[in-house]
Image (cartoon, rainbow, N blue to C red):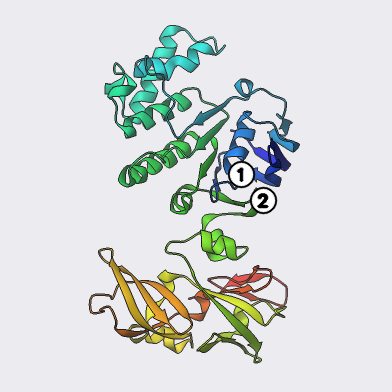
Amino acid sequence: MTRLEISDVTKRFDSPGGEVVAVNDLSLTVDDGEFLVLLGPSGCGKTTTLRMIGGLEEPSEGEITFDDIRVNDVKARNRDVAMVFQDFALYPHMTIEQNLGFGLEREDNDLSSAEITETVHDVAEMLGISDLLDKKPASLSGGQKQRVALGRAIVREPRLFLFDEPLANLDAQLRKSMRTEIVELQSEMGITSAYVTHNQEEAMTIADKIAILRDGELQQLGMPSEIFNEPTNLFVAQFVGSPDMNIFDAKMTDEGETYRVELADSSFTIPAELLPADVDTSEVTVGFRPQDLFLNASSARVQGHGGPVLESSVRVIEPLGTEAIVHAEAADGDITATITQFHEIVEGEAIEFTIAPEHVYIFERETERLIKGRLGSETSETGTTSEVEV
């Protein structure tokens, strides 16, 4: 296993329009056996970061270390990393067995032909592709090709696994099953891994840690639950979660034991214990996740907490089986809610949504930094925090 550390790394490219900074002053650490996901929109620098880890690009500044050993000047073939790409990158003229064993035959590992064959067959059995060994890539499905690509990486037993959107070319159902297999394999082998994707659902389900990038800069590094419940800023909050978070401009005033939050056409209170003691801003942005909204009549408990009540008119209902995404119009702005009690709702109907104060996000308007996350926290006199039960 390997501990990966990226310290103050910047990557610049020359272009006809001038210098482009693809990654800017990036620092993060991936401990032995951890699964890191680099997440962000197109052009945020996540693939460039992965290529620098793999030795395909050299940092303009900063250091990359494996177990505290600097590897900036180490060639890619000498870093002992295995990369899995989006396009599978299999040799079309070779059989699957030859594809799996090719890397071992080229490396100076003192393995005999019999040992390479045994290793290849063991990995093929692990991945459930033993019956494909005599076939060539052209005859395989997308899922089978991806298993072969994974096998070619696994067979080498590298220090690091690097995945560059490996599931992007697969259909939705196959992506779900393949990401489960990747997580199981990585957990079983315990190899430190870095995985690039722009799919936030994929990131949330497979990562030990998520690093969210924007314009080459790290926005937040944390566990999926931290990213979802305590996003560093509004960008992270809006990028993670589906459907998108509902966002409203608001003003917040201190009323002693509570804070009053005033939207354009409604207001509600937040217990002061749910906010940090040093809140000193009045101009805020309020966020409601669609999954946290309830129909007002269906949740007396939430009403009892004094959460906001949003009067709205249903625009569109998108049934998803046991739940539906409801798009509605309110005086404060458009609202999207994911609810289970949707069968009696019709388009054009007037309904009310509400949400528990513990689930309300609050951001400073100007800086967009987080003031209060989804679960809220209660600060003690010692300065420690504890989650408030919902």
* Residue reaching furthest to the front: 16
Q: Nearer the viewer, residue 333 or 16?
A: 16
Question: Can you give x and y, in whole percent of width and height, for residue 213 in the image?
Answer: 61, 51
Depicted 36 relative to depicted 137: above or below? below
Q: Earlier in the sequence, mark 1 or mark 2?
A: 1
Would residue 157 be found to the left or right of residue 337 on screen?
right
Depicted 386 relative to depicted 19: above or below? below
* Residue reaching furthest to the right: 61
Identify the secondary structure beneath mark 1: loop
Depicted 190 relative to depicted 287: above or below? above
Q: Nearer the viewer, residue 388 or 265?
A: 265
Identify the secondary structure beneath mark 2: strand
Q: Nearer the viewer, residue 108 or 137?
A: 137
Q: Nearer the viewer, residue 361 or 33?
A: 361
Q: Quadrant of residue 322?
A: bottom left
Q: Amino acid at mark 2?
A: Glu
Depicted 92 relative to depicted 374: above or below? above
Q: Residues within 10 Å of mark 2 (few under 14, many from 20)?
A: some
Q: Quadrant of residue 279?
A: bottom right
Would residue 300 be found to the left or right of residue 5 on screen?
left
The answer to whether the residues at label 1 and label 2 have Cβ atoms under 8 Å apart is yes
Circle 1 sits on which residue? 45
Would residue 184 be found to the left or right of residue 45 on screen?
left
Q: Which mark is residue 217?
A: 2
Residue 32: in sight, yes or no?
no
Q: Which mark is residue 8?
A: none
- Residue found at x 32% / y 30%: 144
- Residue found at x 29% / y 18%: 135
- Residue found at x 41% / y 76%: 293
Question: Can you give x and y, in whole percent of width and height, for residue 60 in the image?
Answer: 74, 36
